[in-house]
Image (spheres, helix red, strand yellow):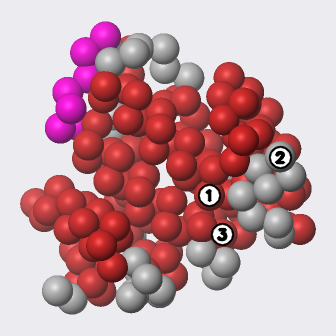
Amino acid sequence: MEISIFASDICYKEVKIHCLLSFSVFLFQKQEIFQDLAPLLWHSFGTVAALLQEIVSIYPSLSSPTLLPVASNRVCNALALLQCVASHPETRISFLNAHIPLYMYPFLNTTSKTRPFEYLRLTSLGVVGALVKVDDFEVIGHKQLLERTSRKNGALLDAASPNS
């Protein structure tokens, strides 16, 4: 499997779902082997935009009591890739400076207890948690914003913090 091909193909609607699934499988199975996945995703033209597009596409469904599991899974796959970018030392600050965590807050503020919504909340917390776990001076300035904005889930964020 050629990862750089998936990074560029994620921008094409026809193969986006396949790429997201392939990346997610790869991420969970071989992340240690391919340490440069986050920089590849971040620096590949249009890849982060395609991931954000996938995330934003589900926003209208958040006001509905029923969210299809397939839609939730697709967004969770995109969030898992963004978590990879958020946790990598080379891409973390750029990720924060681009205010990408703000795209996760609609998921954190949902109240439905159905599984698709719970998965979205949990995966979004994983992205934010990847950021607040780091003892990096530049991240600390952003940490207050992250904690304030996701106040509703503050106990979970505090548990993920290195100072707890």
Which mark sits nearer the N-terminus, 1 or 3? 3
Q: Position of residue 109 (x, y in %)?
A: 56, 23
Please identify the quadrant where the N terminus is shown: bottom left
Amino acid found under the numbered disc labelled 3: Arg
The residue carrying pointer 3 sits among few (fewer than 14), some (14 to 19) or many (20 or more) residues within 10 Å by Cα, namely many
Write down the region rendered in magenta.
Answer: 65-71
Amino acid found under the numbered disc labelled 1: Ala
Q: CA distance from mark 1 to mark 2?
A: 15 Å
Residue at horizontal 59%, vertical 64%?
86
Whether residue 113 is visible to the viewer of this picture, yes or no, is: yes
Q: Inspect the magenta stretch and tell me whether residue 69 lies in it.
A: yes
Give the residue at mark 1. 130
Secondary structure of the residue carrying tag 1 is helix
**Comparing labels 1 and 2, the label whose residue is closer to the camera:** 2
Give the residue at mark 3. 92
Q: Position of residue 49 (x, y in %)?
A: 42, 61
Is residue 29 left or right of 126 when viewed as pictured? left
